[in-house]
Amino acid sequence: MIEEDLIIEMWDVFKEYIPEKNKETAANHYVDFLLGKDVSQSTLEAVMNFDPNLDEAIKLVLDNDEEIEEDDEDYYEDEE
């Protein structure tokens, strides 16, 4: 739970200094950063419903991961 709290707290601190027009991009970079630090997708899902910009960035990651998994399944089906 501490990891989720820290993620939310950090975003809450920094978002105050980000102009509204840049928050979506900043949220995307923040989520990419978290993934680069091996934060699990389940942890990201746990912080959803805190901030709309952060939610959208997390949804993008989750949607992209689902697409990659589907592409992998299609690839292996074609090999048979």
Image (spheres, rainbow, N blue to C red):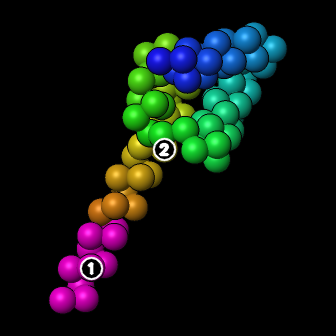
Relative image position of residue 78 (x, y in whole percent): 24, 85
Q: Horizontal placement of 64 versus 38: left or right?
A: left
Gap in Å between the C-alphas at discs 2 and 1? 23 Å
Which residue is found at the position 40% from the left and 46% from the top? 63
Label disc, if present, on residue 61 of the rendered structure: 2
The reply to whether residue 24 is in sight is: yes
* Residue topped by disc 1: 76
Label disc, if present, on residue 28 of the rendered structure: none
Q: Which residues are magenta?
A: 71-80
Q: Horizontal placement of 15 versus 31: left or right?
A: right
Of residues 43 and 60, the one nearer the viewer is 43
- Under mark 1, the amino acid is Tyr
Q: Horizontal placement of 78 versus 19: left or right?
A: left
Relative image position of residue 61 (x, y in whole percent): 48, 44
Relative image position of residue 9 (x, y in whole percent): 64, 13
Q: Main secondary structure of the magenta part?
A: helix
User: Within the magenta stretch, is there residue 47?
Assistant: no
Label 1 secondary element? helix
- Under mark 2, the amino acid is Val
Which residue is found at the position 49% from the left and 13% from the top? 50
Corner quadrant of residue 28: top right
Corner quadrant of residue 30: top right
Corner quadrant of residue 59: top left
As drawn, 29 above or below 50: below
Q: Horizontal placement of 15 versus 54: left or right?
A: right
Of residues 2 and 55, the one nearer the viewer is 2
